[in-house]
Image (cartoon, rainbow, N blue to C red):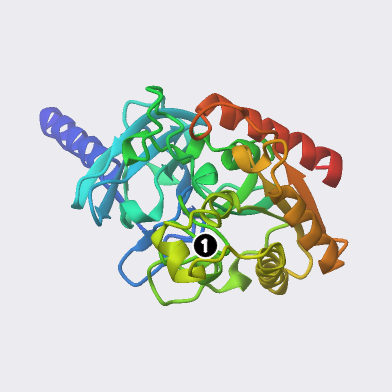
Amino acid sequence: MKKLSLIFLLTLVFADYVAKAQTIVNFKDPKIFYMGRTSVRDTSAELSWTAAAIIINFNGTTVKATLNDEKGLNYYNVIVDDKVVQVIKLKQGQNEYVLAVGLPAGKHKLELFKRTEYDWGRTLFCGFNIDGKLLAPPTYKHRIEYYGDSITCGMADEDTSGKDRGDNDYENGYASYANVAARYFNADMHCISKSGIGIVISWFDYVMPNIYDKIYAHGDEKWDFSKYTPEIVVVNLFQNDSWLTKAKDNEQFKKQFGSTPPTPEFIISHYQAFIKNIRSKYPKAKIVCALGSMDATKEGSPWPGYIEKAVAGLNDKGIYTHFFAFKNTPGHPSVAEQKAMGEDLIAYIKTTFKW
């Protein structure tokens, strides 16, 4: 009889362990925090933009996630208790990934952070499998939104070869100045960015004003701006415009301008129109019109002046300018140069907005 009781007790303990080890958490669970412009649909949550993230607080030791990746080209950082513990490259299609295992028993925070931009594909998040339970979602002190190009994406920031390769293998949006600053301020962050994009011209056939209000850049569905209201919006665009508005042999130049470069007035008016669009979405936000740290802010460049004239003409006391110093090295900002930019932005926000 005692033997049977012991077996029954062990069976209950094992069943309880298995139940804990197989707690399925639906992607719609309100204890999951989605950072970034993420669309929660009927069967999954869709992540496409750089820095889109899924964040949970939980009590347990193991977390797995079921993800369905469009192309098998996206990289994600897995951050546990505010430390990057691994980088995973997703496989194409639906797969389960072990994000954390063997953690000390107790409370933990886990973040799955999209390092790569939307052209490397979308990721559908279907849910978690954990050995414990979710706790209340994290809270954030501030909200920042960014509009930017490859600098903001973190393109080539991990390419230490000097080749400045724009491959997905070397792009880490987590190291971008945008995220350096957001993490410092404990800010919920949205990052609408794309390598090669401009305001009047890009390396492809669309510009930021064409996509800034979309859920997914290549889709038609519009984002509901009432879902997220930033305190500060940072616009770091014009680097690509600075190259392409004088590249008469470029295909996009020919399509846009024929053989005659745009005038400063044309450039300034288009910048103003974009900033007005941002202002119409966020009447109370502070808007920082930034530029740098590549050669658009090199000494003698007219582009900071274009931004200053555009902002002055808007006559809006809630719009500011801030220019990152020219880094004076080849290629895109490295991780170290991104960190320096982030620290620069942190200092500016502290001084200007008293955060």
Residue 149: tell me if it is visible.
yes
- The kind of residue tagged 1 is Ile
Q: Nearer the viewer, residue 211 or 125?
A: 211
Q: Pointer 1: what residue? A: 201
Is 305 displayed left or right of 10 in the figure? Answer: right
Residue 63: tell me if it is visible.
no
x, y (%) of residue 175? 51, 34
Is 341 displayed left or right of 152 in the figure? Answer: right
Q: Residue at x 48, y 70 (%)?
A: 258
Q: Residue at x 31, y 55 (%)?
A: 121
x, y (%) of residue 184? 66, 35
x, y (%) of residue 198? 54, 58
Which quarter of the figure is the C terminus placed in?
Answer: top right
Q: Which of the 4 image quadrants contains residue 90?
A: top left
Image height of 167 relative to 210, above or below: above
Q: Which of the 4 image quadrants contains residue 340?
A: top right
x, y (%) of residue 157? 46, 32
